[in-house]
Amino acid sequence: MLRWIIHVDMDAFFASVEQRDHPEYRGKPVIVGGLGNRGVVSTASYEARRFGVHSALPMATARRLCPQGIFLPGDHRKYSRVSGQIMAILDQYSPLVEQISVDEAFLDVTGMEWLYPSPVEIARAIKRQVKEELLLTVSAGVAPNKFLAKMASDLQKPDGLVVVEHGREQEFLRDLPVEKLWGIGDVTAKNLQDKGIRTIGQLARLEPPQLKRLFGENAVTIHNLALGRDDRPVISGHEAKSIGAEETFEHDLFAADDLRAALLALSERVGYRLRREKTAGRTVTLKLRYGTFQTLTRRRTLAEPTQIDETIYRTALELLEQQQGAGSGVRLLGVTVSQLEPERPVAPSLFDNPEEKGRQISAAVDQLRRKFGAPMVVHGRLASRKEGKETKDD
Ligand SMILES: [Mg+2]
C-alpha cells in the first residue's frame, strides 16, 4: 500500500484570525507579536510581508520597515481555541494526526482510499471545510512522506495545494534551493553556495566522502532527505513524547508573585493540551533561563500520571523554589510534561480522589473556555499576571 502523508499549515495564522474577526484590518498589513523592546514578530499578514516583515524579525525592525502597519499583541487564548477547532476538523479525516505547532499538523492518510477517491481529494476536503467553518485558509502538501509533504505545503502559500507523486520525489526536489532542506541553516547554506552547491538536486548527487566532510554525522540523514527519503512515522497526540509550553518575558522577572503567576499560566496551557489529547504524564520538567542566559532544567517524576493544571503547577513551583537565591532575574520559564500515557477512566467510587476531582474541575474549565473563548475563567492568582511577549507551545 502506498504511503500518503498530508501536511496542513494555516496561512499567516494569527494575522488571518485577526483579519477575520476585524474586517477593518482586511487588506492591510497586520503584524502580531511582542510589542515591547524584546518583542519579535510572531506572524505577519501577507500584506505586511510585502514590506519585508516576517516572523522572528525583531519588532523594532518591523516598525521601521512598515510604519503604517497594524501592530497587535495577539490573543493567544483565542488562537489556541481556533487551533483546537482546526485539529478537531483534521481528526475527522484520519486517526493519525500529529500536531506540530499551533497551526500545523501532519495526517497519515495511507489506506483511506475506501473513503475518498484519492489523498488529494482528502486535502481538498480539509481545505474546503476549514474555509467554510472557520473562514480561514490553509495550505496543504500531499506526498509520500513527512519531509516532502512539509516542503510541498510551503510552495504555493497562501491557499496552496501541492502534490508530490510517488516516484517523482527527486524531480520535485531537484531545483529547490539547498536552504529549504531540513537541518541546513544559514551558515551551512552559505558554505554550500560558496562551493557551487545551490540546489537540492546538486546535493543529492554528492559522493559519501564529500557529504561526510560537509555534514559529519548528519551526512546520511541529509543525503536521504535530498533524495526525498524520509520514513519517520506520523505520531498522534497521545503517542507524543511530551507536551510543553514556554515563555520569554518582556522584562526579566524577579518577584516571586510574578514568577508564580507565569508558571501557573504555563501549567494551564500544558494541562489544557494534555486533556485535549486525552493523555497524562508522569514527569514534570521546569526550564529556567536567567537574565544572564544561564539555562537549567529540573525534573520530577510523580507517582501517578497527571493532566491537571494544579498538580503540574505545584510540581513545577517546587522545582522553581529549589532554585531560589540565584539572585538573577528570570528571562524564560518553560513547563513540560513527559512520559505520557493515555488518560485512564476513573471509577465513580474514586470521585473523592484528589486527582479525579482536579480532573473534573479542569474539564469543566476547558468546557467553559471552548464555549466562551475569551478568558472567562481565570484563576484568581492570574489576575496580576504580566503579559509575556514571546510565547511558544511545543
Ligand atoms: Mg502557518
Image: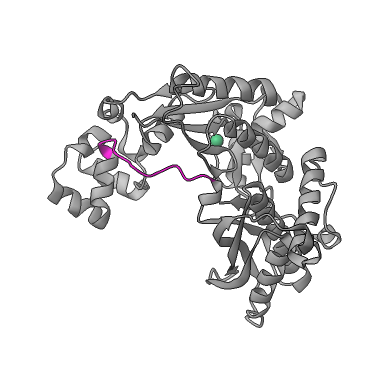
Name above or below for residue 13 compared with residue 131.
below
- Provide residue 135's location: percent of width, then percent of height: 68, 23
Residue drawn at (72%, 56%) of the image: 268
Is 29 left, or right, of 194 in this rendering?
right
Q: For ligand 1, which image quadrant applies?
A: top right
Secondary structure mostly seen in magenta is loop
- Provide residue 37's location: percent of width, then percent of height: 65, 54
Residue 266 can be seen, yes or no = yes
Is 356 left, or right, of 342 in this rendering?
right
Q: Nearer the viewer, residue 6 or 307?
A: 307
Residue 68 can be seen, yes or no = no
Provide the residue span drawn in magenta: 226-236
Q: How is the image coloured?
A: one colour
- Provide residue 267's location: percent of width, then percent of height: 69, 60
Q: Check the picture and name the quadrant holding the N terminus.
A: top left
The residue furthest top is 117
Is 259 left, or right, of 323 in this rendering?
right
Q: Nearer the viewer, residue 172 or 97?
A: 97
Q: Nearer the viewer, residue 232 or 389?
A: 232
Residue drawn at (38%, 38%) of the image: 147
The picture quadrant where one finds residue 54 is top right
Magenta stretch: includes residue 232: yes
Name above or below for residue 80 compared with residue 314.
above
Residue drawn at (71%, 58%) of the image: 346
The residue furthest bottom is 325
The picture quadrant where one finds residue 310 is bottom right
